[in-house]
Image (cartoon, grey):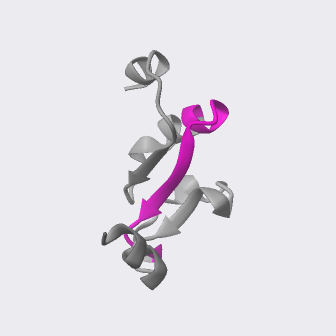
Amino acid sequence: MKRMIEGEEFGRIILVSGDGDYKKLVDFLIKRNKFEKILFPNEKFASSLYQKLGSEYYDYLEKPEIKTKISH
């Protein structure tokens, strides 16, 4: 996925995941200013690998304001 991203022109990426499988990809995208946010299902299912991410890089799908934004 990283190889594919390196050669592509695109805006910023939003991921929806609760596990830590994408942590290296998230770090890679942040360094290249291509990462918008990771959306966790809820606070209970957010991997501890993301604990050091700044709050500007994550949010929770369970929040009403997030549900409203993605429901359209």
Q: Nearer the viewer, residue 62 or 19?
A: 62
Residue ID at (37%, 56%): 16
Rendered residue at 41%/50% (across/down): 15
Work out whether 8 lies above or below 70.
Answer: above
Q: How many marks?
A: 0
- Residue 23: % across, % down: 50, 43
The residue most toward the left is 71
Q: Residue 18, located in which quarter of the rendered image?
A: bottom left
Given residues 67 and 55, the one toward you in this image is 67
Q: Position of residue 45 (x, y in %)?
A: 40, 69
**39 relative to 36, above or below:** below
In the rendered image, the vertical position of residue 65 relative to residue 9, given as above or below? below
| Residue in the foreground of this view, choosing between 64 and 11 | 11
User: Residue at the location (47% across, 24% down)?
Assistant: 9
- Residue 36 placement, left or right of 72: right
| Residue 40 belongs to magenta span | yes
Q: Position of residue 1 (x, y in %)?
A: 37, 26
Q: Is residue 15 left or right of residue 36?
A: left
- Residue 25 placed where, x, y %? 48, 35
Quadrant containing the C terminus in the rendered view? bottom left
The picture quadrant where one finds residue 71 is bottom left
Q: Residue furthest bottom?
A: 64
Magenta region: 28-43
